[in-house]
């Protein structure tokens, strides 16, 4: 009740500022880069892409990227427990290892599992997040069957700007953030450091700690040449309360420690006004350590666990060259070469590396005063393990400018290279190796059609998208013929079909009040008719009120029934109940005026506002009502 009272106080303080409100200025559509690898206004895209802006991150007060990804049409996020627990993202029914995740263009998917765990990715350095829904393999290669999530960090420029925020909440949850951005002459700089800590909400071993830092330097050597350096670091430690879920008892001592590094150096230059190129080199490195000691848990007369110490060290080293040539205002040609070396070492016996070279070509045509956009493209990947893979694509859009209507459609192929686990997982527990070095990549093709409509001077925006995807050679574990213990080996045997509809709505109800909503329907055809942890029906409603000093944000996340696997006896298939969760965030800018202080705000958020008891994955209880309250200040001249 005290927390709710604090939010009501923020509202009351804010309403005193409404009298002098002014109409918001018209804004141009955002420029995005993920869909075409070139800067293109969002309203000229031929594919389906969602932009989560820095303003939306502040309105939601999201400390983790996974929190805002839940709000995107076509995306399903599964967090297996409290903060810090493994968090998977699915796009349009894909598996999590069919979603490519980038930070400033650097791939951060694990080379062992193929997926990225979003448990530790924080928001303090982020400028925007671009989510491409649908295959992006022509430009990005493997992993991008379901889509691409590109996280773009802030660039420093202008006068020095220093930000500090301090928050605390229940479960001994706390967050501290410091940022520093600005520019000196030709140099732009941006630094951030953030810490999140919590004791969690379960009886034992549910604590979490995360320290994240980020640095970016942009140097404009000449009017036509620039050099960029980027570095990100994450260090986290998590209690694995659910490690003994199969025995329906908590694990008091299982731990996971994760360290991640991302580094990138990029040179960009204009050769002529209509011709540019860029060269970059990058590295992503991760070190996961899992530890567990014997505890009192007994399962069918045997100890649940033994003393174990495991480590996994995935790494991706990349180099890339890309050039863009523009012919007047109707043609843009893009050609690129990309090299990746994916490697991993584990204490379980994997110590492997695979190289891949990709060549991509894309042509953007714009006719009839940019009303008609046509984009064909093709990519060839030459993989050291399985050989070559071709991924063509074609998409087009026509904009009826007089009535604000856009029609779009496209076709694309995609593939996913086998992960190092699937290729080389070693023998164990009396079984031969699960890994199969003869695996082929998973393959897909899809079609997309969409309609976008703007009305009332763009105060009302609606969109509808239909997608159809078919997949073959899905990698699944299958019994080894003749094995007396029923052991499994990875094989290319699976097939699947997906059909879905995404509906989105954006309305400026009146001055300062906006409503955004989306609904996704997903249908599938698999071998057993099931699709684990992905709902047929899901949707979101986001209501945001911004007026001078006050901002209030209300988010409703609705997820329908999902197929799942029972986490405890009796094991087998089950159906997990649907849920609806309400989150609330609010900020109020204090009317204080002090030297060198640009702005001071009270900030607060409540997740799971009505304290609903629910599971995102069977047997993994989601956090109860939790809140953070605090102060945010910005300093500068």
Image: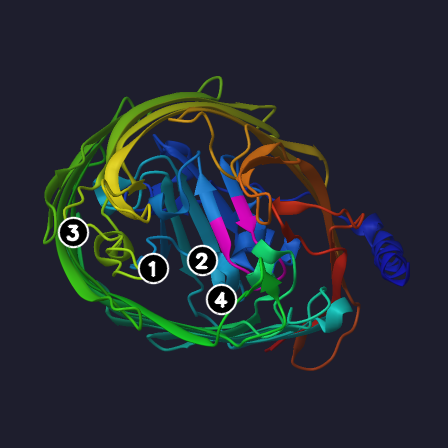
Distance CA(mark 1)–CA(mark 3) = 18 Å
Mark in front: 1 vs 3: 3
Q: Looking at the image, which residue is at 55% across and 63% down?
A: 243
Choose the circle earlier in sequence order: 2 or 3. Answer: 2
Residue 514 inside the magenta-drawn segment: no
> Which quarter of the figure has residue 450?
top left
Where is mark 1, residue-wise? 110
Q: Which residue is mark 2?
A: 117
Magenta span: 77-88
Position in image of residue 231 (x %, y %):
36, 73
In this rendering, is residue 446 above or below 308? above
Give x and y (percent) for residue 157. Answer: 43, 69
- Distance CA(mark 3)–CA(mark 4): 39 Å
Contact between marks 2 and 4 (CB within 8 A): the answer is: no
Q: Would residue 39 appear left or right of 562 to someone viewing this image? A: left
Q: Earlier in the sequence, mark 2 or mark 4?
A: 2
Residue ID for mark 3? 437
Q: Residues within 10 Å of mark 1 (few under 14, many from 20)?
A: many
Residue labelled with disc 4: 125
Query: Which label's residue is closer to the chain start, 1 or 2?
Result: 1
Measured in 3D between alpha carbons, the distance from the residue under mark 1 to the one under mark 2, in whole angstroms, is: 8 Å
Separation of residues labelled 2 and 3 (CA atoms): 25 Å
* Crowding at mark 4 (Cα within 10 Å: few <14, some 14-19, many 20+): many
Q: Secondary structure at mark 4?
A: loop
């Amino acid at each position: 009740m005290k927390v709710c009272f604090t939010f009501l106080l923020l509202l009351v303080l804010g309403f005193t500022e409404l009298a002098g409100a002014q109409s918001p200025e018209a804004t141009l559509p955002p420029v995005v880069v993920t869909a075409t690898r070139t800067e293109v206004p969002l309203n000229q895209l031929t594919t389906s892409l969602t932009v989560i802006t820095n303003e939306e991150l502040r309105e939601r007060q999201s400390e983790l990227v996974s929190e805002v990804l839940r709000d995107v049409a076509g995306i399903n996020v599964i967090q297996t427990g409290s903060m810090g627990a493994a968090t998977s993202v699915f796009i349009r029914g894909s598996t999590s290892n069919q979603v490519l995740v980038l930070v400033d263009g650097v791939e951060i998917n694990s080379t062992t599992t193929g997926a990225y765990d979003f448990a530790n990715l924080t928001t303090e350095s982020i400028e925007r997040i671009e989510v491409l829904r649908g295959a992006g393999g022509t430009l990005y290669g493997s992993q991008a069957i379901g889509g691409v999530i590109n996280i773009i960090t802030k660039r420093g420029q202008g006068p020095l700007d220093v930000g500090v925020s301090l928050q605390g909440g229940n479960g001994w949850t706390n967050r501290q953030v410091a940022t520093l951005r600005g520019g000196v002459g030709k140099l732009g700089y941006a630094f951030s450091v953030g810490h999140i800590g919590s004791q969690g909400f379960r009886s034992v071993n549910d604590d979490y700690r995360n320290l994240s830092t980020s640095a970016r330097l942009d140097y404009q050597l000449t009017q036509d040449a620039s050099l960029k350096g980027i570095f990100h670091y994450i260090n986290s430690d998590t209690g694995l309360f659910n490690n003994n879920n199969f025995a329906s008892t908590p694990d008091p001592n299982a731990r996971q420690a994760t360290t991640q590094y991302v580094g990138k150096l990029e040179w960009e230059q204009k050769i002529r006004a209509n011709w540019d190129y860029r060269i970059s080199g990058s590295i992503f490195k991760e070190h996961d350590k899992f530890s567990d000691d014997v505890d009192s848990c007994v399962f069918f007369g045997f100890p649940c666990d033994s003393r174990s110490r495991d480590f996994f060290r995935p790494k991706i080293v990349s180099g890339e060259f890309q050039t863009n040539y523009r012919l007047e205002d109707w043609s843009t040609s893009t050609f690129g070469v990309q090299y990746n070396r994916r490697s991993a070492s584990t204490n379980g016996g994997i110590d492997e590396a695979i190289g891949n070279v990709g060549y991509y070509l894309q042509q953007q045509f714009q006719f009839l005063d940019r009303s008609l956009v046509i984009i064909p493209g093709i990519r060839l990947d030459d993989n050291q393990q399985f050989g070559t893979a071709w991924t063509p694509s074609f998409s087009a859009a026509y904009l009826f400018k007089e009535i604000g209507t856009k029609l779009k459609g496209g076709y694309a192929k995609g593939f996913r290279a086998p992960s190092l686990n699937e290729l080389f997982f070693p023998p164990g527990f009396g079984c031969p190796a699960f890994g199969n070095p003869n695996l082929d990549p998973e393959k897909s093709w899809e079609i997309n059609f969409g309609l976008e409509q703007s009305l009332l001077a763009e105060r009302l925006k609606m969109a509808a998208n239909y997608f159809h995807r078919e997949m073959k050679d899905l990698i699944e574990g299958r019994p080894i013929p003749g094995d007396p213990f029923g052991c499994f080996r990875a094989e290319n045997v699976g097939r699947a079909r997906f059909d879905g509809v995404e509906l989105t709505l954006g309305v400026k109800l009146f001055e300062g009040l906006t409503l955004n909503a989306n609904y996704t329907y997903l249908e599938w055809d698999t071998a057993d008719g099931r699709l684990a942890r992905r709902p047929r029906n899901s949707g979101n409603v986001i209501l945001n009120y911004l007026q001078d000093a006050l901002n209030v944000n209300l988010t409703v996340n609705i997820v329908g029934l999902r197929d799942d696997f029972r986490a405890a006896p009796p094991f087998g298939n089950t159906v997990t109940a649907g849920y609806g969760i309400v989150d609330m965030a609010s900020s109020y800018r204090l009317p204080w005026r002090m030297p060198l202080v640009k702005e001071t705000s009270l900030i607060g958020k409540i997740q799971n506002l009505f304290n609903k008891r629910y599971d995102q994955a069977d047997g993994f209880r989601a956090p109860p009502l939790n809140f953070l309250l605090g102060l945010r200040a910005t300093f500068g001249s």
